Amino acid sequence: MARLLAGLAVAVVFLAPRIAQADQDLLLFPTRIVFDGGQRSAQLSIVNRGVTAASFQVALVERRMSATGEFETVTELLSGERSATPLVRFSPHQFTVAPGGEQIIRVQVRKPPELEPGEYRSHLLLKRAPDGAPQQRGSGEGISIQLHALIGASIPIIVRQGQLSAALVLTNLEVHRAQNGPASLSVDLNRSGERSVYGDLEVFASSPGKPERLVGKLRGMAVYVPNAIRRASVTIEREAAAQRLRVTFSEDLKSGVRPLAEASVEPR
């Protein structure tokens, strides 16, 4: 159990820092579930490291991401948006986790034979119930991953049908120098294709006679279908602002596969 808690802690801190900030005693892993190919089931773990019981109600909701990464809950889908809600089943719908305990939410997907190729997405919303008592199941509208009177978090549930591909281009790289403190690099992630992209954005600095080094990173960056663009800002080391910068976006850093996208900006 100690090894599980340590792994979950690392995952939450890096992949979903706002969840950790909202409630340091509750760990949620994974932070996204993708059903691809023949996969039909998955599970979500909630670990309570606190000293009091924690109760939740769970629901599927539709959420839309803005170009700057903010989410809003919506009731009507736009053109190009496909809901995974009709395809997904999960259990339980409400539960209480005892101190030091763990709750598993089991998620299953059922694809009808006539399902059209494409990517379908909904979000599994966990809404914290007050006073340790479960509430009646509701829509959960207005709850976000940030801190509220009732703490809530949601993770994307993605169902892919068919052989889907995606491409990414990095544009509009611009270095910003603050009078005091670190500098930053802004960049646009331009997505095309039939599926979302999810990965890490890394910034490397180089100067004549010195090896290239990592000076900034954003983990868990996503551009969801049907969004075509995501604007990001990466904090970088102050001295790196005067050097040549190379930016990469990789969906799996451990695989050794070439980054999905790469671009550079020269010093001014």
Image (cartoon, grey):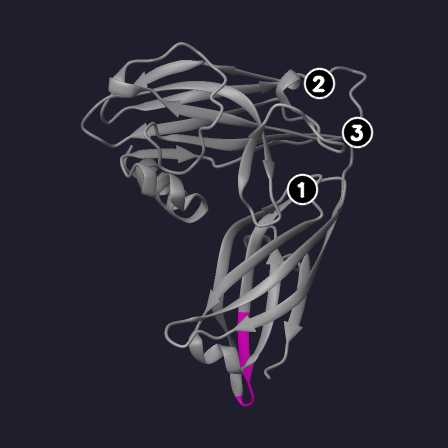
Earlier sequence position, callout 2 versus callout 1: 2
Q: Which residue is mark 2?
A: 111
- How far across and down, in percent of the image, does residue 91 sit? 48, 14
Spot occupied by residue 34 in the image (x, y as percentages of width and height): 60, 33
The stretch in magenta equals 204-209
Residue lying furthest top in this view? Answer: 136
Is 224 above or below relative to 120? below
Give the number of the disc on residue 196: 1
Q: Residues within 10 Å of mark 3 (few under 14, many from 20)?
A: few
Who is closer to the viewer here, 34 or 175?
A: 175
Query: Residue at horizontal 61%, vertical 23%?
Result: 75
Pointer 1: residues within 10 angstroms few (<14), some, or many (20+)?
A: many
What residue would you read off at disc 3? 117
In depth, the one of 85 and 80 nearer the eye is: 80
**With 256 as the anchor, is 119 left or right in this view?**
right
Q: Residue furthest bottom?
A: 209
Q: CA distance from mark 2 to mark 3?
A: 11 Å
Please tell me the numbered disc located at residue 251.
Answer: none
Specify whether residue 207 is painted magenta: yes
Q: Amino acid at mark 3?
A: Pro
Q: Main secondary structure of the magenta part?
A: strand
The picture places residue 86, in percent across and down from the top left corner, at 65, 16
At 78% from the left and 31% from the top, the residue drawn is: 162
> Which residue corresponds to the image point at 36% horizontal and 12% vertical from the top-left?
135
- Circle 2: is it few (<14), some (14-19), or many (20+) Cα within 10 Å? some
Image point 50% across, 17% down: which residue?
139
Helix, strand or loop for disc 3:
loop
* Amino acid type, callout 2: Lys
Quadrant of image for the N terminus: top left
Q: Is residue 137 left or right of residue 151?
A: right
